[in-house]
Image: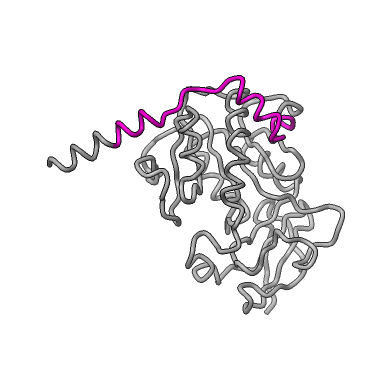
Amino acid sequence: MDYVMNCKICKAEVKKAFRAKVLHKHDVQYFTCTNCGFYQTEKPYWLPEAYSNAITSLDIGLLYRNELFKPIVASMIRSFFDSKARFIDYGGGYGVLVRMLRDIGFDFYRHDTYCDNIFAKNFDVNDLSINQRFEVLTAFEVFEHLENPMQEVEKMLVFSDNILFSTELVPTNQSINPNTWWYLAPETGQHIAFYTKASLQKMADYFSMNFYTNGSTLHLLTRKKISPLLFRLLCYHKISLLVKGITSGKSLLQTDFLNIKHKLNLENHL
């Protein structure tokens, strides 16, 4: 079947790039934008099947990733934003990162419409109709899952003008296919959008935002102007650990425990 498609980022023409077996059985066409280099699949009809489990069995790096990002988020917030404000983790999964960041003093909340909240119960924000604003929105390993990235970023901007996120940029030194780039992950069926630096810059321009990147994994869309060099430095885990250690805050663990305990006591007396 021939598909008439345009780039989901910049609306330019796309061309066929390669095919891959998604979920080991669906023969899927991948396209690349002739303008910004963004890669996308054909219409992802297999997503209900792919999300029968929100966290796939291949995502064995979930805990490692959150441990890695914890000091980076902390150092970014303390360097560029109001550390006393509220924050939200978009696509927050089991709530691991939210709990970790609350444990080191950041008032973080979670938004995820697909995954059960295990570790950050009582800190969900899922109603977009409620006008709640947050200083920073984090979205780690979310963008590659987005069927309509521009619409989803518009939803994120309801929460915050500052979006700190991770997604692997498309390699520039090799041809892309499932044999050369692990991040395509057709086995899971959940990765359907793949970004270049140019495509993320197009996204930033569309929303009138500034774009900062470490050139590989970590990126920031923001209304603020910050130091690109400092941003790249803070993306290094060891440097972020140093900054977090110097400016560590008071844990919310005890406060959260007492507040949740009080809430449970009230519910049981109704």
Vertical side of 244 occupied by 270: above or below: below
Question: Along the horizontal axis of the image, is 216 left or right of 167?
Answer: right
Question: Is residue 253 magenta-colored?
Answer: yes
Vertical side of 252 occupied by 114: above or below: below
* Residue 59, image quadrant: bottom right
In terms of depth relative to the viewer, which is nearer, 137 or 232? 232
Question: Is residue 86 magenta-colored?
Answer: no
Classify the position of the N terminus by image quarter: bottom right
Task: Residue 265: give x, y in percent of width and height.
Answer: 19, 38
Question: Along the horizontal axis of the image, is 25 left or right of 260?
Answer: right
Task: Residue 190: give x, y in percent of width and height.
Answer: 59, 63
**Visible in this render: residue 94?**
yes
**Visible in this render: residue 158?**
no
Q: Residue at x 41, y 43 (%)?
A: 120
* Residue 67, image quadrant: top right
In terms of depth relative to the viewer, which is nearer, 167 or 106? 106
Task: Residue 109: give x, y in percent of width and height.
Answer: 44, 38
Q: Magenta region, mostly helix, strand or loop?
A: helix
Q: How many marks?
A: 0
Q: Residue at x 57, y 33 (%)?
A: 162
**Residue sitting at the far top:** 246
Q: Residue at x 58, y 30 (%)?
A: 74
Classify the position of the C terminus by image quarter: top left
- Its colouring scheme is one colour
In terms of depth relative to the viewer, which is nearer, 45 or 268? 268
**Residue sitting at the far right:** 173
Task: Residue 223: give x, y in percent of width and height.
Answer: 61, 29
State the extent of the magenta-drawn residues as a range: 231-260
